[in-house]
Amino acid sequence: MLGTVLGASAAAVVAAPVAGLLGYRQVKRAALARRLRITAPGGIDEAGFVRIGGIDQYVSVRGEDRRNPVVLELHGGPGASNLVFTPRTRAWEKHFTIVRWDMRGAAKTFGRGGPAGQGELSLARLQSDALELTEHLRARLGVGKVLLVANSFGTFVGLRLARSNPELFSGYVGTDQNIAAGGRDRSSYRALCERLREAGKRKELAAVTAMGPDAAAWSAEQWSQYAKLVVTSDPLTYDTMKTVVVRSLWFSPLHSLGELRTYFTGMSFSEQLGPEAMGIDEWAEGTAFRIPFFLFQGDRDVLTPPEPARRFFDDVTAPVKDFALIRDASHFASFRHPDQFLDLMLTKVRPVVTGRPVAS
């Protein structure tokens, strides 16, 4: 969804003098690599390829105490690996073992097999991969259940996993939660049209009007164009894209320059998933969950607005459920404000999934 925007933003970064920029990148990456070292005797820092769904897929497992709850992240995009945010979320690893997985079509997994080596690319295939990875994690880490944390596009898969496999998951946390409602929810579309109208962007407004408000009827190209206009028309979202997402990519100590190019290519390749996701009706698929259910949404998110997420949440039945807003946050709320997100995880989620309060 955001590959075009990321590519354009990254191009602006590298427009600076190359020698100085690369030198600063090297110094910054080295400092971040030192911060990422896990030296605790009970910690874990493993990364590599795991055979999932018939192809090699990249999985990172990091945490300071193997006794902590295991979090399986489902990244957004599609094709936008969360691995680049590892330095920003270093504090999370004190309280959780964080599993970051490059899904088929994404980042290092995409780089390993290329376009021809990704196999089937569908939401059902991603769901099946996630189940296979969960079984691998349960055996490798010796845990009965893992905590699902899904963001943005990953929430489409996350909701389905949480509904259908309560025996595997201790809870579900959605952030940047997508609620497509089978194309019926048009609040973000109307808000975009209003922003473009107020800004006098007639050409862009005409393009959005020509698409029509039914996202389920858009092509992959229209879906991508829409996302680009949403991001670039909202100052907070665009600032987050530049200062959080692009900077995390550029300075990632876990990615070479070549891998950054692969990252963008993988996102473009994965955009074919967009139209399938837009046809999902979350209410029709079910509002009954047999595991604890949490939604933490950016209060100023214009791409996945909090209001549809709240309406869905209100209809959810679950053993425990909670909804909270992350302050002064657009899309990528958990990565713009990782401290706020961690506080929500520690005060609302961890006590529920562990059965005990967080030690002070």
Image: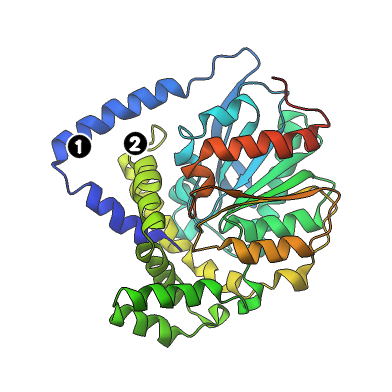
> What residue is rendered at 80% in x and 57% in y?
164
At label 2, counting other C-alpha atoms closer than 10 Å, the crowd grade (few under 14, some 14-19, many 20 or more) is many
Percent x, y of residue 320:
82, 48
Viewer can see residue 348: yes
Percent x, y of residue 227:
43, 67
| Quadrant that contains the C terminus | top right
Q: Which is more toward the observer, 35 or 315? A: 315
Q: Is residue 111 left or right of residue 308?
A: left
Marks 2 and 1 sit apart, C-alpha to C-alpha, by 11 Å
Label 2: state its secondary structure. loop
Q: Which is more toward the observer, 234 or 218? A: 234
Q: In this view, does 215 lie to the left or right of 115?
A: right
Percent x, y of residue 341:
58, 40
- Tell me: residue 69, above or below residue 108: above
Which amino acid does the dot numbered 2 rest on? Phe
> What residue is rendered at 35% in x and 85% in y?
206
> What residue is rendered at 79% in x and 37% in y?
353
Which amino acid does the dot numbered 1 rest on? Leu
Q: Which is more toward the observer, 35 or 294? A: 294
Label 1: state its secondary structure. helix
Q: How many labels does the image show?
A: 2
For residue 251, the mark is: 2
Q: In this view, does 291 lie to the left or right of 324?
A: right
Percent x, y of residue 64:
61, 21
Viewer can see residue 221: no
Q: Which of marks 2 and 1 is nearer the N terminus?
A: 1
User: Which residue is labeled 1 in the image?
Assistant: 21
